[in-house]
Structures are given as structure tokens and as C-alpha cells.
Image: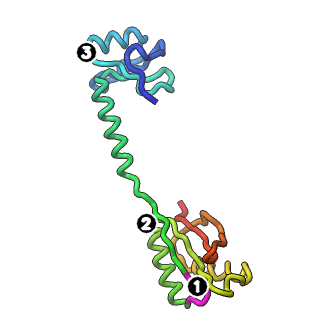
């Protein structure tokens, strides 16, 4: 959505902010536009949904520049979350599971999602579903971080998997 400037503004009354960020109060549209033209600047509607709408007196180019700077800063602040993967087999020993769970806990604390996969080969693909889920739960019980399940047990071509992420 683009901001309305000068004669594009439709509101009859506006809460006006001056060029030095001082509050000029609620003015009629004509008064506000006259003040902006007197200062040689634009009248920009910055908050159209407020009652009355808020407008600011400033140079439109400068306003666009500041808005793009704000947007870039917000984009830069967010860290992308990855989906990391941990693979275990049916016969994986307790010590190895503990190491994998420790790694998973570290990744969860960094904010990543984790896909825990139970790799099945040969005949083990046709084992009882409850037994396979219990094998996956062995790893989940060892994870020290608080987590929530984002994707429940899914059977895939390579085996069974579950996806977890950090609980807020």
C-alpha cells in the first residue's frame, strides 16, 4: 500500500506532526496542506487507519528513504531457520542416541527445526508401527531443550520421521 501525499489525502481532519516531530494537533485538511506548502514540504498520510488519520509534514523523498532503511533493518534482523536432520537406526546404541540428542538440543536452542529420522532397511520396514515410534521416542526423551512437535510421525520411503521445533 502506498502512502497518500498532498491532494491524494481524502480525510477531512488530520492529526498533524510537524517537520521537527512536534505535534500540531488536529487540523482540517486545508489547514494542514497550507502549513506543508508554507514550509515547502509535502503532507504525507502515515497512518490512514487511525482516528483521525495521522499525517506528517516532511519531504516525500526523505520519507521513502527512511522507510526503505527501516525495512532493510527489519529484514536483516531475522535469522533464517534451517531444518536440521538427525538419523538413527533401530539398533543405534544408547550412547550414540545421547550424543545425537545433545546435538539436537544445541540446534533447538539456536532456533532450528529438527527432523529426527528412523532409517529402516530391508525387513525392518515392515515392523510394527508402535515399535518404530517407540524407537524414535528414545531419542526425543533424551533431548534437554523444550520442544513441540511440528510434524507428527510420517512414514516415508526410507523409514519413519518426526519434525520438532523449539517451544516458545
- Name the residue: 62% across, 79% down: 136
| Position of 157 relative to 50 (above/below) | below
Task: Answer left or right for 39 relative to 89.
Answer: left
- Name the residue: 31% across, 40% down: 69
- The local crowd at label 3, few if under 14, some if 14 to 19, many if 20 or more residues have their Cα within 10 Å, is few
Under circle 2, the secondary element is: loop
Image coords of residue 12 (percent x, y): 48, 12
In the image, 141 versus 122, the foreground residue is 122
Task: Answer left or right for 78 relative to 88.
Answer: left
What's the mark number on residue 11? none
Image coords of residue 10 (percent x, y): 47, 15
> To which residue does mark 1 refer?
89
Going from N to C along the chain, the mark reached first, 1 or 2, is 1
Residue 13 lies within the magenta run? no
Under circle 3, the secondary element is: loop
Going from N to C along the chain, the mark reached first, 1 or 3, is 3
Rounded to the nearest whole Å, what is the CA distance between mark 1 and mark 3? Answer: 73 Å
What's the mark number on residue 40? 3
Magenta region, main secondary structure: loop
| Position of 89 relative to 74 (above/below) | below
How many numbered circles are shown?
A: 3
Rounded to the nearest whole Å, what is the CA distance between mark 2 and mark 3? Answer: 50 Å
> To which residue does mark 2 refer?
110
Residue 89 lies within the magenta run? yes
- Name the residue: 63% across, 74% down: 157
User: Which range is magenta?
Assistant: 88-92
Rounded to the nearest whole Å, what is the CA distance between mark 1 and mark 2? Answer: 25 Å
- The local crowd at label 2, few if under 14, some if 14 to 19, many if 20 or more residues have their Cα within 10 Å, is few
Tell me, yes or no, whether the two marked residues, 2 and 3, touch with CB atoms within 8 Å: no
Image coords of residue 137 (percent x, y): 63, 78
Amino acid at each position: 500500500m502506498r502512502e497518500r501525499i498532498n491532494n491524494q489525502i481524502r480525510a477531512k481532519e488530520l492529526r498533524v506532526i510537524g517537520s521537527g516531530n512536534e505535534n500540531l494537533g488536529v487540523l482540517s485538511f486545508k489547514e494542514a496542506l497550507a502549513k506543508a506548502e508554507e514550509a515547502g514540504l509535502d503532507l504525507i498520510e502515515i497512518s490512514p487507519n487511525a482516528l483521525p488519520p495521522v499525517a506528517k509534514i516532511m519531504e516525500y523523498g526523505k520519507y521513502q528513504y527512511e522507510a526503505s532503511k527501516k525495512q532493510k533493518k527489519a529484514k536483516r534482523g531475522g535469522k533464517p531457520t534451517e531444518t536440521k536432520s538427525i538419523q538413527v537406526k533401530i539398533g543405534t546404541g544408547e550412547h550414540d542416541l545421547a550424543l545425537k540428542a545433545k546435538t539436537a538440543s544445541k540446534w533447538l536452542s539456536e532456533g532450528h527445526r529438527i527432523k529426527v529420522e528412523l532409517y529402516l532397511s530391508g525387513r525392518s520396514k515392515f515392523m510394527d508401527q508402535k515399535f518404530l515410534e517407540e524407537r524414535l521416542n528414545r531419542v526425543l526423551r533424551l533431548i534437554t531443550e523444550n520442544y513441540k512437535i511440528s510434524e507428527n510421525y510420517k512414514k516415508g520411503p526410507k523409514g519413519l520421521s518426526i519434525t520438532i521445533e523449539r517451544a516458545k
